[in-house]
Image (cartoon, grey):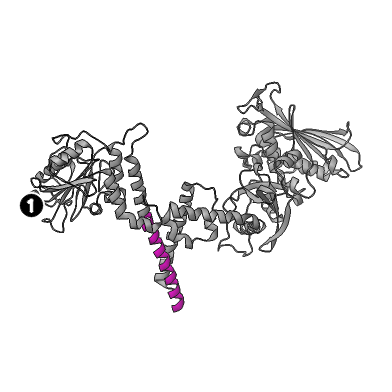
């Protein structure tokens, strides 16, 4: 029983992405190359292919932004003309047969003409060929989705020589919009797709692309912009199957990244970016002749047989799995691993310098800017320490952070194995436990280094914030406030790592409740109806920041209030509205009067007598100094602040200048910074 095929059905099931809009043209060019290869007695030097761009009107002309000529009218089609073997009877029969196997030995899948009808409304073919009696004949026909092959006519040839002209007409708008618009980008795209033909030992025929008066010779384009050194082809085996890998050194402007071109039937199916996949291979390389860009071409009969019908990928599993029945079944990962190994071998001498520079880049970045990663470097292999020497700090930080996350994930898995101790001898278990604990120790060191490094960043930001800008203006107090603790938040709203109360006093970092720029009446630790908003206020059981009630029992507590003023503010005056110290004491009184409670809502006996600690962070301007002297506070030995005790409010008071604040914080952290190799101002 005969089985018929539906052209419309096949077209419906044939996929062509908009990004591959020129793929039908590429197929026509490859067919032309094969036609001139098959032409008997044709001198390779005489083989010729012309690609003509057809536009709605060749008269409309304009310039693009770069000053290069461009065409106002869109492309409506292409003409591909060759002097190859022509559409003889066998080729014509193959063309009529969907999924023809006539050229299967060359990796052809018989679907190129289907792609023509995906992007073009119709195709017209004129061809001259030699029949079985060596008589020169010619045939013409039209190919459409609706009628298939139609208007076919054959007769004696009116011109000399074999050859074919294929006219791709009616470029569908959905594809036309995504295709290059000018001759040189189109010529370059054709060359990229057919690059293997230029690399092969026999070379490519003469191919020119024309657009009106503009002509691009692909051979000259290849020599001028692509080829830098002769190619080298080697055979490699993947699970016993032969593959051929061709190495090329191309001019640096030919492509932005190093590539592995996966090929089938002498066509590039897709390009794989090799940046970072081979240690040291990130971009340009250098040899005795100068800089070059690496590219390789991978081909085999296995890839020819496995390519998808649209030639956009391969029907090969990505990785080998335990479910594979055949242990010799190949995966993309198997093939890639062998190819990359050979690429690394071929480029070994060129990669050495980049590997050294990349590792130096990592070590220098870790030593000067990211010491948290120093403990884990010894757990990273050369492949992970291989970075582009020109990588930016942000990208390098992200890369190292991913490696740290991978190590932490490995630790979780190794920890389970160590705890289970399954299938391990005593000595083997001890060794595994030792390695596990060493890695845990290094990761914890990394966490500590990150914490210390963050402190250094906070101090640097604070130092920058208190400096005058180019116009002599200083940062508002809310900018400085936010560095120490996010505004309008409580300890229930933000993670403890978001506050930097250690800048003022290490003891303030431990609290039961913390409020930042919140009205006192909205704090659950007091019943006060006051609308006053202390900058920082916390409750703590034994020590704490801003407003703190501290102590193991409710009888032992302290209330801490912190006020932050704008750098170099010089308007302090008598009264709670203008005197920062009076403001802090006023907040303290309001909290006490509201009968302070613990964070869990329990009353504190003797709340009126809870000791208070008031910190005012402000520069010692003349008016601020006057307020401190009027209050009879003592000048600190370094003359960077004042301190004293207010008996009426039962509170210790300290006024800290920004310079003193930074200096004292740096002194407390000096040993940690020094240990990590961080510079200390």
Q: Nearer the viewer, residue 399 or 655?
A: 655
Q: Nearer the viewer, residue 40 or 101?
A: 40
Q: Nearer the viewer, residue 626 or 651?
A: 626
Q: Where residue 177 sits in the image (x, y, percent)? A: 61, 31
Q: In the drawing, does residue 616 fall left or right of residue 356?
A: left
Task: Examine the structure image and report whether residue 425 is included in the region drawn in magenta.
Answer: yes
Q: Secondary structure at mark 1?
A: loop
Which residue is farthest bottom? 426
Q: Where residue 126 sits in the image (x, y, percent)? A: 80, 33
**Which residue is identified by label 1?**
606
How many numbered marks, from 0 up?
1
Q: Is residue 24 visible?
A: no
Q: Is residue 536 above or below residue 70?
A: below
- Main secondary structure of the magenta stretch: helix
Residue at image position (36%, 55%) is 673
Q: Where residue 395 sits in the image (x, y, percent)? A: 48, 48
Give the magenta-colored segment's residue range: 422-450
Residue at image position (91%, 39%) is 135
Q: Nearer the viewer, residue 480 or 145?
A: 480
Which residue is farthest top? 59
Label 1 Cα neighbours within 10 Å, binned few <14 / some 14-19 / many ≥20 = some
Q: Is residue 415 visible?
A: yes
Q: Is residue 379 above or below residue 41?
A: below
């Amino acid at each position: 029983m005969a089985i018929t095929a539906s052209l419309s059905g096949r077209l419906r099931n044939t996929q062509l992405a908009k990004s591959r809009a020129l793929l039908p043209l590429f197929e026509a060019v490859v067919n032309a190359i094969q036609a001139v290869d098959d032409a008997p007695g044709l001198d390779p030097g005489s083989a010729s292919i012309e690609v003509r761009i057809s536009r709605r009107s060749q008269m409309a002309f304009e310039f693009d932004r770069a000053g290069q000529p461009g065409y106002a009218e869109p492309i409506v089609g292409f003409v591909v003309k060759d002097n190859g073997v022509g559409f003889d009877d066998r080729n014509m029969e193959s063309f009529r047969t969907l999924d023809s196997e006539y050229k299967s030995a060359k990796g052809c899948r018989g679907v190129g003409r289907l792609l023509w009808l995906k992007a073009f409304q119709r195709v017209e073919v004129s061809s001259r060929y030699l029949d079985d009696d060596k008589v020169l004949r010619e045939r013409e026909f039209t190919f459409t989705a609706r009628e298939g092959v139609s208007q076919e006519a054959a007769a004696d040839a009116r011109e000399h020589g074999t050859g074919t002209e294929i006219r791709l007409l009616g470029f569908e708008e959905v594809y036309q919009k995504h295709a290059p618009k000018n001759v040189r980008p189109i010529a370059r795209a054709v060359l990229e797709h057919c690059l293997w033909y230029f690399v092969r030992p026999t070379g490519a025929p003469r191919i020119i692309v024309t657009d009106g008066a503009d002509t691009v010779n692909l051979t000259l384009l290849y020599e001028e912009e692509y080829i830098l050194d002769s190619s080298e082809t080697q055979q490699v085996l993947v699970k016993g199957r032969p593959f051929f890998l061709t190495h090329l050194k191309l001019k640096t402007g030919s492509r932005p990244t190093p590539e592995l071109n996966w090929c089938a039937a002498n066509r590039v199916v897709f390009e794989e970016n090799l940046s970072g996949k081979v240690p040291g291979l990130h971009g340009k390389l250098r040899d005795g002749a100068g800089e070059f860009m690496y590219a390789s071409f991978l081909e085999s009969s296995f890839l020819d047989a496995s390519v998808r019908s649209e030639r956009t990928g391969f029907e090969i599993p990505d990785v080998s799995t335990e479910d594979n029945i055949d242990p010799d079944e190949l995966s993309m990962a198997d093939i890639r691993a062998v190819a990359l190994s050979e690429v690394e071998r071929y480029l070994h001498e060129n990669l050495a310098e980049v590997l050294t520079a990349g590792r130096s880049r990592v070590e220098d970045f870790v030593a000067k800017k990211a010491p948290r990663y120093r403990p884990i470097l010894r757990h990273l292999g050369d492949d992970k320490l291989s970075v582009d020497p020109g990588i930016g700090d942000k990208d390098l930080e992200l890369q190292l952070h991913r490696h740290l996350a991978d190590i932490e994930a490995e630790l979780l898995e190794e920890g389970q194995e160590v705890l289970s101790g399954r299938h391990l001898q005593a000595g083997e278990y001890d060794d595994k436990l030792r390695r596990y604990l060493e890695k845990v120790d290094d990761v914890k060191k990394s966490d500590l280094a990150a914490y210390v490094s963050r402190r250094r960043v906070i101090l640097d930001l604070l130092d920058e914030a208190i400096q005058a800008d180019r116009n002599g203006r200083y940062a508002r107090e809310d900018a400085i406030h936010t560095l120490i603790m996010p505004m309008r938040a409580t300890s229930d709203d933000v993670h403890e790592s978001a506050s930097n109360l250690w800048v003022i006093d290490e003891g303030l970092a431990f609290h039961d409740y913390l409020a930042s720029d919140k009205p006192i009446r909205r704090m659950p630790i007091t019943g006060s109806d006051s609308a006053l908003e202390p900058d920082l206020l916390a409750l703590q059981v034994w020590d704490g920041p801003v407003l703190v009630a501290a102590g193991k029992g409710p009888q032992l507590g302290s209330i801490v209030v912190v006020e932050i003023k704008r750098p170099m503010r010089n308007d302090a005056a008598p009264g709670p509205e203008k005197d920062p110290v009076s403001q802090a004491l006023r907040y303290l009184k309001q909290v006490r009067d509201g009968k302070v409670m613990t964070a869990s809502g329990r009353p504190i006996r003797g709340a009126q007598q809870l000791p208070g600690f008031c910190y005012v962070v402000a520069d010692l301007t003349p008016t601020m100094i006057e307020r401190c002297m009027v209050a009879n506070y003592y000048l600190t030995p370094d003359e960077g602040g004042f301190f004293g005790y207010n008996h009426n409010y039962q509170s210790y008071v300290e006024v800290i200048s920004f310079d003193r604040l930074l200096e004292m914080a740096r002194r407390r952290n000096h040993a940690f910074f020094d240990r990590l190799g961080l510079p200390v101002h």
